[in-house]
């Protein structure tokens, strides 16, 4: 019995010697165990979020464009400036003295004629070319009829003479469209439309077309009236 008691006391003493260093060691955190680093920091720790590293873009510059001395408006744009595809640089970029009949803004202008900018390349030109050749063919037929009624016997009396006057008027009306050369004469340059102030031919053409249109309409009305008498 005494021997058993001594054995138990010896075992308990050995166990206490073994467990004492283990219990006195400081606890190890999981992060320190994984990374092998020192103790965790004691300061405030920021939890990462989706916008932690987000940086706002710089604010847009609000500096006004340079002006001419004395506050006379923006300076002339650089001649080498680039404009959108349907526009060309404005040679007179003064907003205080704009040139009439020009479609300009920001140092760029719509090329004349402006209608070409809203269709496929050469689409409007093809239509104008077709109208030009059709008009030439019509002019030829009108002249042929006028000569026929002029030289054939019995065609210079009523009511046939009204056809002669009508065909002569139509021939002159078709010819008036050829006063300005080319099938597309809407512009005098890349920016300005043709009008009576910048093109004398355009003014003469406009007057003749209006006059001969009214003349042809009157002769046509007179011919219809005589045919129903």
Image (spheres, helix red, strand yellow):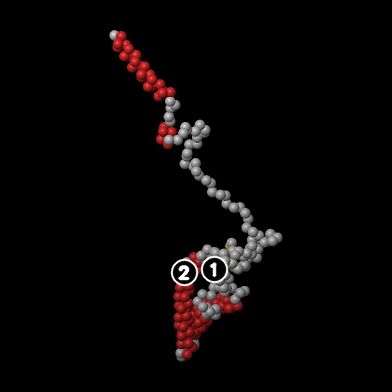
- Position of residue 78 measured from the top left corner of the image (x, y, whole percent): 60, 65
Quadrant in the rendering for residue 187: bottom right
Whether residue 57 is visible, yes or no, is: yes
Q: Nearer the viewer, residue 114 or 156?
A: 114
Asked if 13 appears above or below 114 in the picture, the reply is above
SS for callout 1 = loop
Residue 58 shown left or right of residue 73 in the figure: left
- The residue positioned 57% from the left and 49% from the top of the image is 59
Residue 121: which disc?
Answer: 2
Quadrant into which the N terminus falls: top left
Asked if 1 appears above or below 132 in the picture, the reply is above
- The residue positioned 53% from the left and 75% from the top of the image is 185
Q: Residue furthest right?
A: 70
Residue 71 shown left or right of residue 86 in the figure: right
Callout 2 crowding tier (Cα within 10 Å): few <14, some 14–19, many ≥20: few
Asked if 199 appears above or below 9 in the picture, the reply is below
- Position of residue 72 measured from the top left corner of the image (x, y, whole percent): 68, 61
Picture mark count: 2
Nearer-N-terminus badge (2/1) = 1
- Position of residue 127 measured from the top left corner of the image (x, y, whole percent): 46, 72
Callout 1 crowding tier (Cα within 10 Å): few <14, some 14–19, many ≥20: many
SS for callout 2 = loop
- Position of residue 208 measured from the top left corner of the image (x, y, whole percent): 56, 78
Asked if 113 appears above or below 140 in the picture, the reply is above
Q: Residue furthest top?
A: 1
- The residue positioned 46% from the left and 87% from the top of the image is 148
Q: Nearer the viewer, residue 41 or 187?
A: 41
Residue 111: which disc?
Answer: 1
Residue 93: which disc?
Answer: none
Residue 173 shown left or right of residue 11 in the figure: right
């Amino acid at each position: 019995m005494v021997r058993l008691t001594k054995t138990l006391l010896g075992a308990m003493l050995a166990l206490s010697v073994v467990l004492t260093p283990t219990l006195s060691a400081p606890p190890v955190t999981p992060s320190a165990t994984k990374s092998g680093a020192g103790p965790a920091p004691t300061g405030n720790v920021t939890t990462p979020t989706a916008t932690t590293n987000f940086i706002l873009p710089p604010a847009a510059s609000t500096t006004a464009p340079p002006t001419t001395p004395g506050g006379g408006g923006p300076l002339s744009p650089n001649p080498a400036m680039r404009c959108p595809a349907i526009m060309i640089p404005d040679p007179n970029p003064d907003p205080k003295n704009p040139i009439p009949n020009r479609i300009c803004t920001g140092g760029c202008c719509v090329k004349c004629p402006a209608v070409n900018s809203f269709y496929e390349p050469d689409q409007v030109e093809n239509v104008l070319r077709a109208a030009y050749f059709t008009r030439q063919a019509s002019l030829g037929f009108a002249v042929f009829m006028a000569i026929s009624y002029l030289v054939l016997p019995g065609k210079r009396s009523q009511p046939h003479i009204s056809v002669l006057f009508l065909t002569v008027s139509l021939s002159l009306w078709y010819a008036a469209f050829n006063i300005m050369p080319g099938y597309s004469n809407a512009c005098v340059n890349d920016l300005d439309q043709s009008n009576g102030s910048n093109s004398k031919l355009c003014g003469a053409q406009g007057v003749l077309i209006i006059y001969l249109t009214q003349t042809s309409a009157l002769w046509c009305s007179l011919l219809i009236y005589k045919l129903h008498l």
